[in-house]
Amino acid sequence: MDWSLLIIGIGLALFIEGVAYALLPSGMKALLIAMLEQPAAKLRRMGLTMAAIGVAIVWLVRSV
């Protein structure tokens, strides 16, 4: 397994998160507050959906 690809992916995710907090701190706080008000089941579905989309993107890119 090529671990460098995994490390690049983690680094990219951290970069995107960091930029969001750096450029829109008030918006991120509002988003977190809104997430606290959501039921756990809805957050779980949203997380699984995003994970599935991520896997699909990686699969599509790697298969080309």
Image (spheres, rainbow, N blue to C red):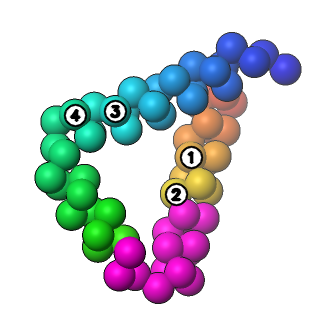
Neighbour tally class for label 4: few under 14, some 14-19, many 20 plus, Cα within 10 Å: few
Which quarter of the picture shows residue 64? top right
Above or below, 61 against 25 in this view is above
Q: Find the distance from the CA under tag 4 to the CA under tag 1.
A: 24 Å
Q: Earlier in the sequence, mark 3 or mark 2?
A: 3
Binning the other alpha carbons within 10 Å of mark 1 as few (below 14), some (14 to 19) or many (20 upward) gives: few
Q: Which mark is residue 18?
A: 3
Q: Secondary structure at mark 1?
A: helix
State the image coordinates of residue 2 (x, y, percent, origin top left): 78, 16
The one nearer the camera, 31 or 55, is: 31
Instruction: Identify the amino acid type marked 2.
Output: Met
Rounded to the nearest whole Å, what is the CA distance between mark 3 and mark 1? 19 Å
Residue 50 disc label: 2
Looking at marks 2 and 4 on the same chain, the residue that comes earlier in the sequence is marked by 4
Look at mark 4 in the image and give the residue it sits on: 22
Residue with the mark numbered 1: 54
| 29 and 50: which is toward the camera | 29
CA–CA distance in space, label 1 to label 2: 6 Å
Spatial CA distance of label 2 from label 4 is 23 Å
CB within 8 Å, label 1 to label 2: yes
The residue type indicated by label 3 comes to Gly
Which portion, as a residue range, is magenta?
36-49
Numbered label tally: 4
Q: Which of the two discs, 3 and 2, sits closer to the camera? A: 3
